[in-house]
Amino acid sequence: MTALVPRRARRLASLAEALLTPHGMDRYLELVDPMLVRREIRGLVTGVRRQTPDTVTLTVRPSRAWRGHLAGQYVRVTVEIDGVRRTRCYSPAGSEHDGTLELTIKADPQGLVSRHLNRTVTLGSVLGLSTADGEFTLPSPRPRRILLLSGGSGITPVLSMLRTLAAEKYEGDLVFLHYSNGAEDALYRTELADLARRLPGLRVVHAFTHAKTGGDLHGFFSKEHLAEAAPWYPDAETFLCGPKPLMDSVREVFEADGIGAHLHTEEFAPPALTFDTENAEGQVRFARSGREVANSGKPLLEQAEEAGLSPEHGCRMGICFSCTQIKTSGCVRNAKTGETSSEENEEIQLCISVPVGDVEINA
């Protein structure tokens, strides 16, 4: 008899969903308590702390639709700002074995969402969440030697890896090398020291790029830093996330040493792409809004925003797929690969799709 109860509950839920069409049950549950929604994922902020003046660390309890994350993955976080839903990607800093989410966000002076999360979100705030995504993850079985390398707020995905390895009582060689301006900007410094005491094979190395004292290493990344922190790095799997200059420098060393295949990276910022704005031709029509603009040669996301539209988006670099829309007609060029596509009614990513002539988007 008891086995029938969940089945009946599911049937009743399905019936209610049908009766409440087109809005569905979630839209009504959200009016009562946003955390009750069934199909979408919400996160309740249960902790707010500041490690530095320009960062905030949020502890978030996900709703029941959450299915967890793998260390190194990212989630799309959605907030409403001035009546418009805005989405950005952030990497959880917690262990994949922990049921909560920890997000550490640095306020970008030009970043609408990061500033909002730093200044406005408080205990009890509810965030929109996506399922976890991304391929920047630890392999299984775990490698015998691991180097985790990060800079600034790029620490979060590799810290997630470190916390995961600590929870698993990892017994291999492990180095955590983190770059920051100085002690006042070094995120998670106290916890990293505690992890180093608890995990026998772990060595934590702090490199200060601007401060002359207080760090284990000083100055910007170099091969000498690498050799001093982890002399066995050629035989290790290295996981890297940080600002572009750091990532470029590390890639250069690994490629020169012929071990590029052992370097795994998560992009910290959109790649620098160039666009031919002088020779752009054609019109771009946003069908749903009825707006039409002259093609500027920029990605469709930028053209939509310049036309006064606010399409959903996240990473702005072709990773998260938040900005995916239907192109009903015309040709676009992928700004990352250079490939063009003229298929009708195809899904494209607005942030990396550049119109080639006339294009119509269902936006």
Image (tube, helix red, strand yellow):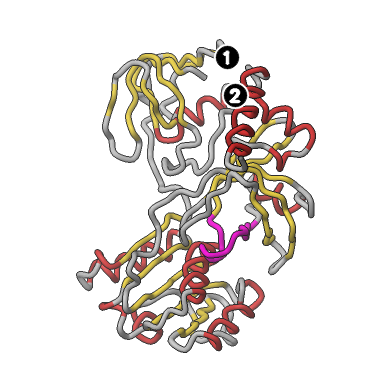
| Element type at mark 1 | loop
Q: Residue furthest top?
A: 290
Label 1 Cα crowd, 10 Å radius (few <14 / some 14-19 / many 20+): few
Residue at x-position 43% and y-position 62%: 245
Q: Kindly identify which numbered label has been placed on residue 305.
A: none
Number of callouts: 2
Who is closer to the viewer here, 220 or 57? 57
Question: In which quadrant will I find the N terminus?
Answer: top right
Question: Considering only order in the chain, which callout, 1 or 2, is on the residue closer to the N terminus?
Answer: 1
> Residue at label 2?
309
- Look at the picture and state if 216 lies above or below 238: below
Instruction: Assess whether mark 1 and mark 2 are in contact (beta carbons under 8 angstroms).
Output: yes
Q: What residue type is labelled 1?
A: Ser
Residue at x-position 47% and y-position 74%: 168
Q: Which residue lies furthest to the left in this view?
A: 258
Q: Does the magenta stretch include residue 103?
A: yes
Q: Where is residue 104 in the image (x, y as percent from the top left)?
A: 62, 60
| Element type at mark 2 | loop
- Look at the picture and state if 209 lies above or below 336: below
Q: In this view, does 48 lie to the left or right of 189?
A: right
Q: Does the magenta stretch include residue 139?
A: no
Q: Where is residue 298 in the image (x, y as percent from the top left)?
A: 44, 30
Residue at x-position 22% and y-position 73%: 257
Q: Can residue 103 be seen in this view?
A: no
Q: Position of residue 188 (x, y in %)?
A: 61, 73
Magenta part of the protein: which range? 91-106
> Residue at label 1?
289
